[in-house]
Image (cartoon, helix red, strand yellow):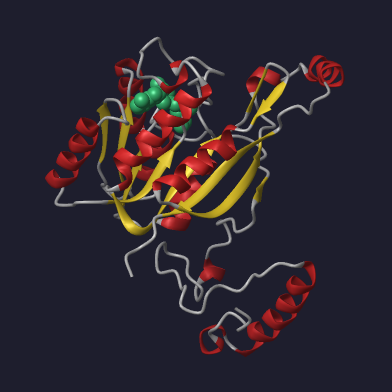
Amino acid sequence: MGVVMGSEHRLGRNLVDDADEIEAEAQELGYVLTPDPDEVSDIGEATGENWRDFPEIATNSLWIIGSRERTGAHVGDYHGNFVPQIPFQAIRRFTRPGEVVLDVFLGSGTSLIEARRQGRHGIGIELIPATAALARGLVASEENPRGTWQEVIVGDSAEPATTEEVRRVLGGRGRDSVQLIVAHPPYHDIIRFSDHPDDLSNAPTLEAFIERFKSVLRATYGLLEDNRFLVVVIGDKYRNREWIPLGFYTMQAAQQVGYRLKSIVVKNMEGNRAKRNLENLWRQRAFRGKYYIFKHEYVLFLEKPGHS
Ligand SMILES: C[S@@+](CC[C@H](N)C(=O)[O-])C[C@H]1O[C@@H](n2cnc3c(N)ncnc32)[C@H](O)[C@@H]1O
């Protein structure tokens, strides 16, 4: 550490001067912002050289998303979906056109719609057949500007048989790995997605939920190319007078499986349907219960370390 960006020739004189200033300020604040000299990303289209061409890609850890993207197939009706801006960011930053995105909790298919829109291939796994059918229909209704393919598999993401099915689909397309995994699991039992026993929202205890989430990550780890990213999207819950930090537990689970934590992004939940028009009721409850109202969720970025 300490070498400013480690690559004067790559950045050009002016930027290096700026970087010196940034570095000094960061050190004063106790941060180390310099990347390892040999950590130069070549995944994604935006790099340390051409990044100015990608103003739409976020680089800060606080995402305030004003309103839900609702164009094309992003109708947003599925209870428990995420805003398309999340997969948009992850896909833009950490994949290139023609690469493969795997969503292990597909739901209504938001990430595959986004993959298609951005010219990436995609595979989604969804446990509930009716939900998988909904996703298939929505994805197919999205324009396909680059003629990419998206496939939906019905199955339990924790099951090795499902992993085999993903391998079969990849093999049929002449591939053997994916370049991004998106995991937006149930936030334990906050929303019950079905009465299927393998549904993570039916895990009988918090421990069982984390264990099952870990099994999903273990089952799919081998599908991800080295040096690529897993994105976990999750919120916390509140039960029995206690804040249950599902975000931190799932983050730790991912680290235990072998992933390296690269960023914890905090995203606002302003548009949350359940809470709209109920501000005062929530406020009163917060005072009574001595807690703060959930207004954020996490987008965790984890990297699969390469062999070196
Ligand atoms: C939070 S939702 C994902 C929503 C999605 N991101 C969207 O925008 O529509 C979680 C989904 O995971 C599914 N699910 C739960 N357990 C699963 C499992 N073991 N394997 C695969 N899917 C599962 C649920 O049916 C639900 O549709």
Instruction: Classify 253 as above or below 154.
Output: below
Horizontal side of 141 relative to 244 (left or right) equals: left
* Image quadrant assignment for residue 169: top left
Residue 173, image x, y percentages: 16, 47
Residue shown at 19% from the left, 45% from the top:
170
**Residue 246 visible to an observer of this rendering:** yes
Q: As rendered, which of 99 and 240 lies closer to the eye?
A: 240
Residue 203 position, x and y percent, is 45, 19
Image quarter where ligand 1 lies: top left
**Residue sitting at x 66%, y 29%:** 271
Q: Which residue is at a point 42% across and 38% down the rendered structure image? A: 111
Quarter that holds the N terminus:
bottom right
Is residue 144 visible to the viewer in this orientation of the structure? Answer: no
Q: Quadrant of residue 214?
A: top left
Vertical side of 205 occupied by 166: above or below: below
Q: In the rendered view, does 81 fall on the left or right side of 109?
A: right
Q: Nearer the viewer, residue 203 or 131?
A: 203
Locate residue 140, reporting x and y percent: 30, 32
Q: Quadrant of the C terminus?
A: bottom left
Question: Residue at 79% across / 26% down in the picture?
Answer: 291
Is 235 situated above or below 34?
A: above
- On the image, the x and y values in percent for residue 44 come to 42, 61
